[in-house]
Image (cartoon, helix red, strand yellow):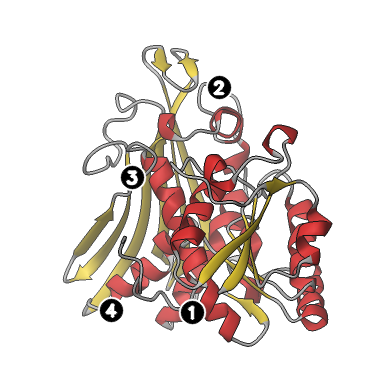
Amino acid sequence: MIDTVVWGTGNVGRAAIRAVEAHPALRLSGVIVHSPDKVGRDAGDLAGMDRQLGVTASADIDAVLAARPKAVVYAASGEVRPNEAVDDIIKAVQVGAVVVTPSVYPLYDQRNAPAELRDPLLAAVKEGGGSLFVSGVDPGWGNDILPLLVSGVATDIDVLRCQEIFDYTTYDQPDSVRWLVGMGQPMDYSPPMVAPGIPTMVWGGQIRLMARALGAEIEEIRETVARRELEETVTTKLMGDFEKGTQGALRFEVQGIISGEPRIVIEHVTRIHPSCAPDWPMPPTGDGAHRVIIEGNPRIEVSVEAVDENGNRSAGGNATAAGRLVGAIDWLVEAEPGLYDAIDVPLRPAFGKFGG
């Protein structure tokens, strides 16, 4: 059994605990938390499970890592603290752990990560013998392994498009929704998520990964952004009111340019209410979906809808991110120490995961 620590118990961490517990080759050996009110609580309780797991949460990072776990699922936030997240990951790699995480966007395409980011991680790998794999859902399998799988049944491709279409009232992170994405803010507010260069920083690696796998050369990466205002005030269950005249929908694209045209495109369409921007793409059903569209011969469209935690679509997406990461651990343990990306790490059948 592979002793595995889950570091962070937020939206992804909760799902990661459940995924580790379900995996036939893994044993949950520790949980690291930052909030004092979580210290000492059972992992099953923190993960929203209906049973105790016999593993209590600790805020003592050094003590947990001193036990030299074979794997760490790093689920702590890296959006607003990327340097601290990388420092944490280096600590785990230095003790020989395989680290899987969705938290550091430039490392999704680790081959093209800046040297100042990549070199300390390579040094940690050399020192401790650990490994690192960074992936998730979007960025993640929704715009790497899924579109590449679908591309394999196409005869020719004009445009490969990956879409995330979501109602953000299901996304239990009010600060991110209001301030990072800009929902409910005045229309002259500039959301940090779509500031020039940020979409490319987050999703450009996925464009490059797909291009590499498809044998295509990206000439440049472009960004487009569109915003719509609410025509009426909207009241949400989780985040309160979003006022009329404020931002109610956001749409952006990250475009990989091939032969002068956008040929590999990652598109996000997010709303705070389905009444806003009804002419923009909508999910097939419910509150959200990930979709791959191949314009070519034949035209192919695949939509994936995931739910978890009482039918929540955002929680479903987080659970698939955890599934992708946790499912890679046993393969990474057997592989050579190093830095890996989504093309390196295979997606395998869910061996041994039927419930008893």
**Mark 1 lies on residue:** 212
- Which is more toward the observer, 343 or 252? 343
**Mark 4 lies on residue:** 152
Q: Position of residue 104 (x, y in %)?
A: 65, 58
Decide: few, some or many residues near mark 1? Use Cα within 10 Å; few <14, some 14-19, many ≥20. Answer: few
**Is label 3 in a helix, a strand or a loop?**
loop
For marks 4 and 3, give the CA distance. 27 Å
For marks 4 and 2, give the CA distance. 42 Å
- Measuring 67% from the left and 81% from the top, which residue is drawn there? 338
Decide: few, some or many residues near mark 3? Use Cα within 10 Å; few <14, some 14-19, many ≥20. Answer: some
Sooner in the amino-acid sequence: mark 2 or mark 1: 2
Q: Position of residue 152 (x, y in %)?
A: 28, 79
Residue flagged by tag 2: what amino acid is it? Gln
Relative height, residue 177 to residue 298 (above, below) = above
**Mark 3 lies on residue:** 307
**Is label 4 in a helix, a strand or a loop?**
loop
Q: Position of residue 282 (x, y in %)?
A: 27, 40
Q: Is residue 101 left or right of residue 217?
A: right
For marks 1 and 4, give the CA distance. 14 Å
Foreground mark, 4 or 3? 3
**Is label 1 in a helix, a strand or a loop?**
helix
Q: Is residue 76 visible?
A: yes
4 and 2 marks in contact (CB < 8 Å):
no
Foreground mark, 1 or 4? 4
Residue flagged by tag 3: what amino acid is it? Val
